Amino acid sequence: MNIPSHQMSFSGQILERGFWLYVWKIKFENTLYFYVGRTGDSSLAHASSPFNRICQHLDFRDNAKGNFLAKRLKEAAINPYKSKFNMLALGPFFHEQDTFENHKPFRDHMATLESEVANHLKAYNFNVLGIHHPKAEVSKTEIKNITEKIIKFANA
């Protein structure tokens, strides 16, 4: 019997909770798609690790929660079982906060970075899954530094 084997490797730093930005590069049938995400819950004072978000994003059960990437793949008729995934995670930008009031400015900052990265990828004519909304002011220098890394990853 020929049983397929697969490998995964990662730095343990990706397990750290906090406010992260990440980009998925998904190849399906010779087409590249991108998904931009962030950690930092919208309604609770939680900021998980990117590794934790991987598990949530790729939960294909009908009753799964927080599986936004799985939903976008389904909407775009992308078969995840026949796709190749590569993720770049940047961060953590900020540490997890104790209260929701302290959490909100960091969450909003990350939402804007997420939106800027998605728009930047679209400007380079990449296929970006999902909708992203800015929530706060972010410096142009910070955006430039991040988007340079993202475009390098996208073109690799």
Image: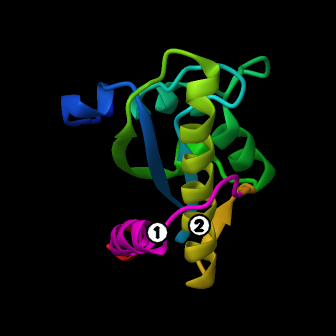
Q: Earlier in the sequence, mark 2 or mark 1?
A: 2
Q: How many marks?
A: 2
Q: Which residue is mark 1?
A: 143
- Secondary structure state at the residue bearing disc 1: helix
Where disc 2 sits, the SS reads: helix
Residue at the image position 75 percent from the left and 56 percent from the top: 131
Residue 30 part of the magenta-drawn span? no
Can residue 17 be seen? yes
Q: Nearer the viewer, residue 2 or 106?
A: 106
- Identify the residue shown where x is 71% and y is 56%: 132
Q: Are marks 2 and 1 in contact (CB under 8 Å)?
A: yes
Instruction: Pick out the residue farthest to the bottom.
Output: 124
Q: Is residue 137 magenta?
A: yes
Instruction: Give me the residue at 20% from left, 28% from top.
Output: 12
Question: What's the CA distance linking mark 2 and mark 1?
Answer: 7 Å
- The magenta region covers 134-152
Indicate the amino acid at tag 2: Glu
The percent coordinates of residue 51 (x first, y second) are: 40, 29
Type of colouring: rainbow
Number of other residues with Cα within 10 Å of mark 2, as a class: few under 14, some 14 to 19, many 20 or more: many
Answer with left or right where residue 18 lies relative to residue 44: left
Q: Residues within 10 Å of mark 1 (few under 14, many from 20)?
A: some
Q: Give amino acid for label 1.
A: Ile
x, y (%) of residue 89? 37, 47
Say which residue appears at 69% left-offset and 38% top-offset: 68
Question: Which residue bears the numbered disc 2?
Answer: 116
Given residues 54 and 96, the one toward you in this image is 96
**Which image quadrant: the N terminus?**
top left
Residue 21: where, in percent of width, then height?
Answer: 46, 48
The x and y percentages for residue 115 are 63, 60
Task: Say whether residue 79 is left or right of residue 98.
Answer: right
Our reading of the magenta stretch's main secondary structure is: helix
